[in-house]
Image (cartoon, helix red, strand yellow):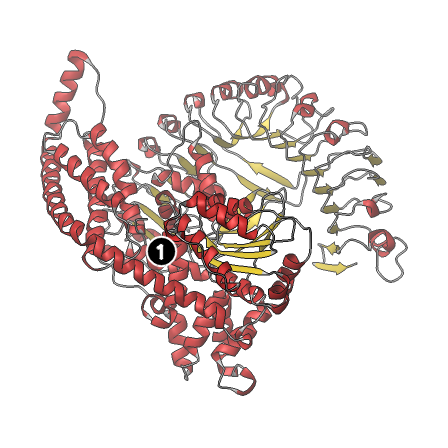
Amino acid sequence: MATPALQFALQKLDSLLVKEQQLLQGLDTGVNDIKDELESMKSFLRETDITENTGGIKAWVSQVRELAYDVEDILEEYTIHLGRPSKHGFVGYIQKTVHNMKHLRTRHRLATAIQEIKIKVSNISSRKNMYTTVNLLENGNSSSEARDRLHDRHVAAVFIEESELVGIERPRKELIELLLEGQSHLTVISVVGMGGLGKTTLVRKVYDNERVKGWFNSHAWITVTQTFSFEELLRSIINQFYKERNEELPRRIDTMEGIQLTGLLRDFLNDKRYLVVLDDVWHINAWNVLKYAFPDNGRSSRITVTTRIRDVGHSCVDTYGQVYDLRPLPQQEAWTLFCRKAFRSIPGAVCPSELEVFSQDIVSICDGLPLAIVAIGGLLSKKESVLEWKTVLDNLQSELANNPKLELIKRIILLSYNHLPHYLKSCFLYFSIFPKNYSINRITLIRLWIAEGFIERDKGETMEKVAVDYISDLIDRSMVEVAEFYDYGRIRSCKVHDLIHEIVVLKSKEENFSTSLNRHMPQMHGKIRRLSLHNTCVDDLKTVRLSHLRALFMFRANDSSISTISKLLYSFRLLKVLDLESAPIESFPIVFGNLLHLRYLSLRNTRIRELSKSLGKLQNLQTLDLKGTYVSELPKEILKLQNLRHILAYAHRNGSEPPFYTTNGVKIPQGVGRLRDLQKLTYLEANEDSSIIKELGKLTQLKRLGIVKLRREDGANLCASIEKIKELRSFSVTSIGMDVFLDLQSLTSPPPLLQRLYLRGPLQTLPHWISLLQNLVRMRLRWSRLNQDSFKCLQALPNLAELTLIRAYDGVKLSCQNEGFLKLKILDLEQLDNLNYIVVNGAMPNLQKMYIRGCVQLKVVPLGIEELVNLKELHLFDMPNLFVQNLRRHGGTDHIKVKQIPIVRSYDSKNRLYEEL
């Protein structure tokens, strides 16, 4: 498999070779020669199998990568100046001639630049021939080194002392029980977790346990690794089994093929209770070819698989088996392990008081990763002064790069990175842009990847869907963590482990992928492609070459930084991403005309009130994020942005007067129907403009739509438009006032894929079409004031997982039908002023969380709540004192009804107090 740098270069070259033909046809500069050489290099890169970049080949790869960047820069410049299409015929000829004369100097400059690129390509290509002859030798050496490192790793797992282990007792006991108990069928146990968690160490201690050794009469341990030979794996297993029983190996085993070896192994195991460990499995292919060698002989045989990749772990578990998720060490166990390693020379391994703050920081960074705790603790055990400890903590990234004692951590984490397919590498490196422990919204990350051109569109799939699969893949590989879920189960945000963040920043520097600046301003050299500023003064940027910048992010920016950036923006001609979220901006003089390649613009949570009309020049803009700003109207020039996919322009406001909570949207000019690629539009202010409501039906690619200030008389037009938007997944609509009805009854055929529905405003009755929403997962009703018979259709929705009712029900009794709400997990009832009773007998079998807020007339907890065996949390907000008193542990007459619920809490928002009941 090619190294990360090689794969990254391949990814760039793949796209560049396509663009080259499309964009450079008008320049007779020998660009076809460049293309031929790039194709040749691309073929060489694909054929190269290097596990460690060493010596000259590493420098060559770096040159190819920078060359790919340079070619892309040329192409981007071309599209700015020369890539504008012209009409056909005589008029087109005149336009083209005038355009070429106007840009004659630019064409000459670009032609010269391409000739220089051609020379670079030729020189790099000639060096490639030299590396072709030495490549086999380098491969042999690196393969030998890899085997040595693998041997060291597994020797450590075998001979590590019991005193060195912390937090292993519980998982070891659980795994032993899985091996020794259960059914007589052949069973697979997959141990899954990120690199460095100690999967191999844990399974080795289980494998060597006396009870386990005695229960099975045949044992084999095989390390599969990323590059495996099916026949060699089988021979190794056979060799271990025969050697264990002191039996002579069959003749000609070295010349047997896979089918023969499989038959031999099956015959040997047919009458034995055996245990096989397949350690470090990276590909499901490994299991698919090996599984036929292990017969299910009804003797309680077991196979244990260790893997970093969740999908592999699940795929190995067929009819009989279990996935065992190995988790990071809890805080206390992590602290104990660190102290044992760092303070081994101190009696009792007690942390000195002057080092406690630094120690806590280190343990926090390691975040329960045993390998990291042991390695860094061992390193610090040799440091004596507070200053030395502080130096290691402040320069952990440098230590990881250069300190041999931390080489194992870096190697194990990079092993996962090296195994990523090339299209995921740049996506993963994007986490280097964000601060440590930063949780990034999932959908934001998707939009950024698309803007950067990282997403390879599959046939029949949108780029957004492909990007979702990329995130799932990174999570499945234990490279990325889920930071937060929505209550109904969808991923809301994600992040990377602190230590992985250190490694990804290190790798990003090596690949020249991104540069991050914080208060410790480093010297910046070379061409900067992506820049993130973290709470720092940026005055020094005036002396830095930023003409190649593709993306700019600012975190915790100050007024001085914004002033500097606004002055520099004119030079960012290749910029694709500009993220100024939460920057102190009230008016920002962006010269949009110079940012013709901008695809992503975020001014989220700034104080900006108005956008420049030059916004219309951003012909490539895909995402415009104005969420949380004071922008109330978009200029008509926005209609020129035919590539626009996402408009986010709204702000939530809370107040002390009715309606207490409002969402402010933006006015959009007539003609919005021209933006045919729009997928998200939130929130459109519909007040007094029926024509825009009618135009929405033209936006057939919309997946999320939010509308505020809808008049009753516009309801029919809105329904007619919604029927045409078959791809809609999320729909939110708010009436113009608390006394203005939402008229949505005329919708006869609702979007079949709708998953989230938010209705804010009075309803005479629930729209009939809601019963047709087979994919609806989340529903919120606010100010609906519905009567007692309105909820029957909701109870039968097959996938409804979350239901929120806020001033949505005027009845005295809310009663659920038997077996109603079968999939409901979250129920939130707020300010149902007339409600006396709730009946859930025989309903909501999967309910996990219940919230009751300000329902001041409610007499008792829901009748039948004791039957909700999956209910884990009951939260009560601002409920009457008597209601709360009856639920208290000591003396509460109704406490017996909720005693089986693990968490029961009462909150007093006025006094900011809460009580465990």
Splitting the image into 4 quarters, where does residue 105 fall? top left
Q: Is residue 200 shown above or below 878?
A: below
Report x, y in % for residue 320. Answer: 63, 46
Report x, y in % for residue 642. Answer: 37, 26
* Quarter of the picture holding the C terminus: bottom right
Give the residue at mark 1. Answer: 533
Look at label 1 and name its amino acid.
Leu
Left or right of 178 on screen, residue 888: right
Left or right of 854 on screen, residue 622: left
Can residue 605 be seen here? The reply is no
Compare residues 513 and 170 and report the one nearer the observer. 170
Q: Secondary structure at mark 1?
A: strand
Compare residues 61 and 647 and report the one nearer the observer. 61
Tell how many labels: 1
Q: Residue at x 51, y 86 (%)?
A: 346
Q: Name the residue furthest top.
A: 89
Splitting the image into 4 quarters, where does residue 432 fall? bottom left
Q: Is residue 125 shown above or below 642?
A: below
Splitting the image into 4 quarters, where does residue 143 fall? bottom left
Q: Residue at x 33, y 67 (%)?
A: 398
